[in-house]
Image: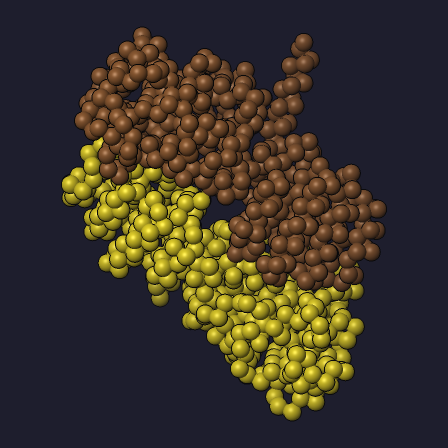
Chain colours: A yellow, B brown
Amino acid sequence: MNQETIQALVNPGSIALIGVPRGLKAGKVFLLGLLDLGYSGDLYLVHPSAEAIDGIKTHQSLTDIPGEVEMVIVLSPKESIWEVLDACAAKKVTVVVLYTSGFSELGGGHDRRDEERMREIARSGGFRIIGPNCMGIYSPGASLAPFPMMPRVAGNIGFLTQSGSLMTLFINACALKQLHFHSSISYGNSCDIGLAELLEWMYTDEQVGVICSYTEGLEDPGALHDVFKRHAWRKPLVMWKVGSTDAGGRAAASHTGSLTGKAHLWDALFRQFGIISVSDIEEMLDTVMACSRFSRSGRGRVVIISGPGGPAVSASDAVERNGLEMATLSESSRKRLENILPPTGTSRGNPVDVGLGASFELGFYLDTLEVLIEDAGIDALVILGGGISDDMNRTYVDGLIRVKEKTTKDLIVVTYPGFMQRDEILAPLHAHGIPVYSTPERAMKAYARLLRFERFQEGRISAVSCSR
Amino acid sequence: MNQETIQALVNPGSIALIGVPRGLKAGKVFLLGLLDLGYSGDLYLVHPSAEAIDGIKTHQSLTDIPGEVEMVIVLSPKESIWEVLDACAAKKVTVVVLYTSGFSELGGGHDRRDEERMREIARSGGFRIIGPNCMGIYSPGASLAPFPMMPRVAGNIGFLTQSGSLMTLFINACALKQLHFHSSISYGNSCDIGLAELLEWMYTDEQVGVICSYTEGLEDPGALHDVFKRHAWRKPLVMWKVGSTDAGGRAAASHTGSLTGKAHLWDALFRQFGIISVSDIEEMLDTVMACSRFSRSGRGRVVIISGPGGPAVSASDAVERNGLEMATLSESSRKRLENILPPTGTSRGNPVDVGLGASFELGFYLDTLEVLIEDAGIDALVILGGGISDDMNRTYVDGLIRVKEKTTKDLIVVTYPGFMQRDEILAPLHAHGIPVYSTPERAMKAYARLLRFERFQEGRISAVSCSR
């Protein structure tokens, strides 16, 4: 994709919607999305018969629009698609988003030939296509959304997805943790612009810090391999590859017409290029949170600070099981903890058991943290705790934020299911960039995945500098 | 444990608390728990100097109490423990719950010998001990709780845990899903009553339908093996065994003085006896929900019904990856679905893609379900969907409940992170026994675990009847 295409994709100055339904049908969401986010560029509606839709004047055809059109979003039925694409060429648009479905996902060679024809029309007409069978673009910096009620705040996460519904689901789930997106592209059957090109752009765009993707399959494995070879070391890519089982492969074929490929081939590719592979939406969220929140300087030496004893044991298992290291506390830390913690019902090793009394006296948690952030042998502090009331938990959260302000070490908060998980209490932690996980297992898995990428990255960077 | 011990454990007619602090310290929670749940038996407080605590008259010693005492809860410091145990013998109590800590979890042979001495005093005094270093008993049917704000509703889940904090965390997390407990025992260092005896009771108690446990280690593997051999086929046991790594083993030793054992030995035991092994609190909750909610008659033939396409693909992966079967729809079902669903943007195979329009027209979901519950080739229906507003989601939930009332097949609702996950909207599903999971991966993993247990159970039952 050239710069003009990228600009038209994520920051178009003008958009035309073709085929917006008059009533509240599925295609209406594209208009509602743009109106809800307050898209401020030139917005045109094309409809053959309606005079206006939702109070917005319509044009009879694309070529009737007086001004320039950078992006066209096509919601028309399958039958009219060729006429629309010809009009896009005549209008000299830059990018076409094809929501229209009914092509290779139906199976059968005829429909695949349709997609080849689309690509040819785009090539000769001088425009590019996202889709068909996609939801298109979310770009909050340009107030662009294919669905209403999407988050308005922009961030540095890029999300590439073959599934449009996962775009809205994942972005909204991330918003609850105040993880925000630079942009997301739902690219569906990818008749023209596919994963490799989109990845190359996101790898090299400095506004994107972390990339994640939901991928069913792809047409050109060679192109993806090439992109990984040149760019995979630049930033973490969290990849949720589905359709690797027979049942999943059949489902993917009927969803986006994808050839999903064998799991072991994908696994080999992931290992070779440090790609972080995840297997469900929660893992993807956990890992993107790690990539967004963690400091990326640690060696994986973890200390666990816990009031409840059981979770501390399972957290210790999680550290070792994920190839991380239980930090050894310095003599000085141990001595200082002896002065802070009660002599019984606590433990000053690692895990540091601050005792059940800490639920009543939050100082046991916070004073322990103050000691441990000064211990040079520790990279990350996992805190399992909380008070016995909402008010105490608010105080606890404030205290954690004050500790975090004093340190560059990673502070990782674990809440536990049913315990201190209310969004309004946790919100300040998210706002201050402190990652929050619902179990130590999930936290350590995500942290270890990021560290493995960083080791890949360091190895790659040093290999490059040696060869120079 | 004999019947008298079991009765005193989960339904004591009288309780004495020794060592309740005057102020709001950790030990106070035991009294607050009993008052909060409204324990209606005889409740006595023993304190050497206070006249009354929280308005309740105290007794100077256990033997000063006029009436019978079935259960004694000991919160006294370590130093006074021998005097207290002697008093328990003199008073002829039935069960002693020792919250007091500072024994084998500190390490060193001396403390282990202390626990042997406790057991000997109990044996000669004619009572049994739970603990030391434990939280004791939760038994909502008898209004017994070691912590305030515990759920009041009783159910049929039994929970045995070495960690007291996990008892409260897990039970409260389950309450949010309306999964209720017959009882839970936090048994800590288990100087006397240990896991094997507790399991034997729960396996043979008809009021307990599902057992779960959090286990760090145990003193007598032979006794556990023997209990499994005789009883494991009776009901599902969901076991969260921690401390299997070196780091976790060390943490467990300082938590409950447990010898944790090698992971591969435990794994062999689990396989031999159909024990369902889980590795974190979320998996335990997911699996207990499956054991409590599912019908236990299915063969694992799953149909996926989804509006969003991406989740349907990953759900198909999850079915196959967990050894379940994608159901083949009957010809009749396919034909009926053709009449219900729009021709494009949907799929009438398995997964059944009801299309994105179903978010606006919930009838597409519900009519599809009505067809599929009549298909004899299907055991379980996984539904991924919802409407575009809270009101629509309430309608959707009502519709699912009406479908469930017409069928014995399992209905499994998947919500997705950040989407239709608000407790107040989902509550009616829980109340009607419909399991709700946050991803298809978690749902299928839990379902498959239950089915594996059922196969173990069927094999065991048929083996028993053959040999007769």
Residue B119 picture location, percent across and down = 31, 14
Image quadrant where one finds the N terminus of chain A:
bottom right
Query: In the orientation shown, which residue stands out farthest toward the top?
Result: B124
Residue B325 falls in image quadrant: top right
Residue B241 picture location, percent across and down = 44, 31
Residue B438 picture location, percent across and down = 55, 48
Residue B38 falls in image quadrant: top left
Looking at the image, which residue is at 69% across and 70% down? A24
Report whether residue A410 is seen.
Answer: no
Looking at the image, which residue is at 58% across and 85% down? A42
Q: In front here: B421 or B97?
A: B97
Residue A466 falls in image quadrant: bottom left
> In the picture provided, is A234 more to the left or to the right than A110?
left
Count of marks placed on residues: 0
> In the picture provided, is A93 more to the left or to the right than B123?
right
Report whether residue A21 is seen.
Answer: yes
Image quadrant where one finds the C terminus of chain A:
bottom left
> In the picture provided, is A344 more to the left or to the right than A68?
left
> In the picture provided, is B428 more to the left or to the right than B327?
left
A394 over B198 or under it: above or below = below
B264 over A206 or under it: above or below = above
Q: In front here: B466 or A257?
A: B466
Q: In front here: A162 or B294?
A: B294
B27 over A219 or under it: above or below = above
Looking at the image, which residue is at 49% across and 15% down? B226
Looking at the image, which residue is at 62% across and 56% down? B393
Q: In front here: A88 or A423?
A: A423
Residue A127 picture location, percent across and down = 63, 79
